[in-house]
Image: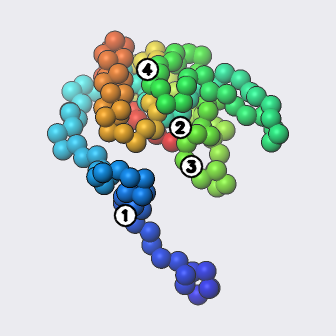
Amino acid sequence: MTESSVDRIPVSYVQKSRAFYEARGFERPYIWAQHDAAPFTKVDKPLSESRIAVVTTTVPVHGREKHGQGDALLADAPKGSTYAQACSPRPHQMYTNHLSWHKEATNTNDVETFLPLGRLSEFVERGRLGSLSSRFYGVPTNYSQRETREDALTIAQWCHEDEVDLVLLVPL
């Protein structure tokens, strides 16, 4: 064993989160979301007859900004707001820097890895899926259960408007 591996101990994410909130003066500890009565239902028709929509935590890009370290992507939708955007034309770039992912081990250059609109369109063409919604939806990565519920209601309304049968959630 190396010295660094001997010094390592497991960290409880739950305990660390509770300590974080307690240190900031919150009156009660963080409560993890639990939805025993979530309205998940059995799929009532074949995928080949279903309309599917995608929900992502990434944000559309509208351009670049120059600064000391090079180019920075600019988000189209304000970070922290729910949005709907047309699937066509498919975005070739999405803003992801505000999200937590291992930026040294991987990248988000291939949008299809986290917003698979092209692959889903192929499945529609092959008859594996009935259709793809004309819009995809984005949600912020808020840690508030109240805000998450509000965002979910907004997404549910948009899905109803777009006659969506199934939703593919692809968080980054």
Task: Say what amino acid the circle numbered 3 marks.
Answer: Trp
| Foreground: disc 1 or disc 2 | 1
Q: Quadrant of residue 132?
A: top left
Residue to which mark 4 is pinned: 132
Label 4 close to label 2 by CB (< 8 Å): no
Q: Quadrant of residue 143?
A: top left
Task: Say what amino acid the circle numbered 1 marks.
Answer: Gln
**Of residues 148 and 24, which is closer to you in this image?**
24
x and y percentages locating residue 6 in the rendered image: 55, 84
Circle number at residue 101? 3
Mark positioned earlier in the residue sequence (4 or 2)? 2
Asked whether residue 17 appears in the rendered view, the answer is no
Residue to which mark 1 is pinned: 15
Task: Say what amino acid the circle numbered 4 marks.
Answer: Leu
x and y percentages locating residue 126 in the rendered image: 46, 25
Label 2 close to label 3 by CB (< 8 Å): no
Residue to which mark 2 is pinned: 114
| Foreground: disc 2 or disc 3 | 3
Q: Residues within 10 Å of mark 3 (few under 14, many from 20)?
A: few
Separation of marks 2 and 3 at Cα, in angstroms: 12 Å
Q: Residues within 10 Å of mark 1 (few under 14, many from 20)?
A: few
x and y percentages locating residue 37 in the rendered image: 17, 39
Q: Secondary structure at mark 1?
A: helix
Task: Say what amino acid the circle numbered 2 marks.
Answer: Phe
Separation of marks 4 and 2 at Cα, in angstroms: 16 Å
